[in-house]
Image: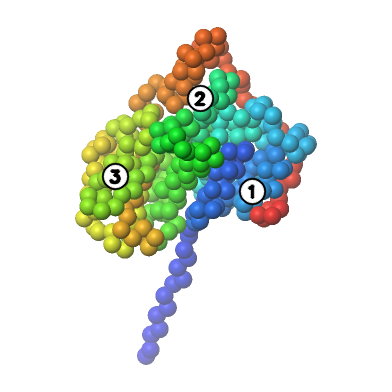
Amino acid sequence: MTINFKAPDIKELKPRILVLGVGGAGGNAINGMIDSGLQGVEFIAVNTDAQDLRISKAQAKIQMGTNLTKGLGAGAKLDIGQAAADESLNDIVNVLQGSNMVFITAGMGGGTGTGAAHVIARAAKELNILTVGVITLPFLYEGPSRMRKAQQGLEELRKHVDTIIVVPNQNLFKIASEQTTFEESFELSNDVLLHGVQSITDLMVRPGLINLDFADVETVMSSMGKAMMGTGQAEGEGRATKAAELAINNPLIDDYTLKGAKGLLVNITGGKDLKLFEVDEAVNKVRSEVDPEAELIIGAITDENLEGVMRVSIVATALDGQQPEPKSVINMVHRIQNRNPGYSDFANNGSTQSFAFSNPNNSIITHGANA
């Protein structure tokens, strides 16, 4: 008698990951991610400005608040940004549904990104989606008013995300030179946002030596609050330790050390010459910087474009217990105050503007890069 065995069908269940660029800065950030070839995610441009949406490279676009703004921007007004998101909340929810993880990237301090980001984050959390904010803060030269708005938007966004990564644009001066052009400075900022997203998503969507699944990422990012990220790249002798040290000592996010982190995601990427010993060396260097009880999750990926080069990316989460206030916001406000004696201390002059949901109306949603 012949017995035939049939292997069961194995379905590959990849997480659906969205990256929403909210407002002008968020839209520019996702254009940079698309140009870089970031894999395994869907890009959504969300804006009130029809002109910005027309030049977006995103796969899908949501024009918010068409009745309110008539296709124009929010005019640097937070309440307009929020009202536009409220008006288009049905369209936003329709895009979010069915996703496992959402990155919301925006620049704080303007109207659309600052006013709308928290509305989108709240909608995502109500759908039980793992939600991560990756945002920038203004340069000091942009003034105290914009910094106050940025702080206000940041604090509201924190209420509705699992994890938030904050990149102060002012810290770009630490890596820029006198020859760095204005355009190049924003490219540097967008690169930081790219690495923050890529260091997480690559471990889930790209084949590698040590792959992670969505549950692994959720372990270190769900309800974890403030986070920091760093990426280091090195080659030659001792490249593993050098890359790890560069990632640990990220000059762009200076608020926290790894010591208080409760969760840590480590992404090690290299060419086919990446050695087991080097992975061990890099991980041990990172481990020496954190609490022994921290949840440490490690992934390793090979990239033929990195032959001879080793890259270490770190996302450290649950940093809330380290400081009572985020230096990246509060210290910048105080430094502006010191330069402008007539400027009153925003942190101590009363309550900030309240944010509340309103009943949304329908708006237009267009799909396709050329929509």
The reply to whether residue 317 is visible in this rendering is no
Q: Secondary structure at mark 1?
A: loop
- In the picture, measured across the screen, residue 318 lies left or right of residue 36, that is left
Residue type pointed to by label 1: Ser
The secondary structure type at the circle numbered 2 is helix
Measure how far apart labels 3 and 1 are at the Cα level.
Answer: 35 Å
Mark 2 to mark 3 CA distance (whole Å) = 30 Å
Of tags 2 and 1, which is closer to the observer? 2
- Marks 3 and 1 in Cβ contact (< 8 Å): no
> In the rendered structure, which amino acid carries the disc numbered 2?
Leu
Q: Which of these two is toward me, 50 or 161?
A: 50
Give coordinates of residue 110: x percent, y percent.
Answer: 61, 30
* Residue type marked 3: Ala
Pick whichever, 79 or 168, lies toward us.
Answer: 168
Mark 3 — residue?
Answer: 244
Q: State the residue lying farthest toward the front.
A: 179
- Left or right of residue 227: residue 35: right
Give x and y (percent) for residue 74: 69, 32
Q: Residues within 10 Å of mark 3 (few under 14, many from 20)?
A: many
Q: Which mark is residue 140?
A: 2
Q: Earlier in the sequence, mark 2 or mark 3?
A: 2
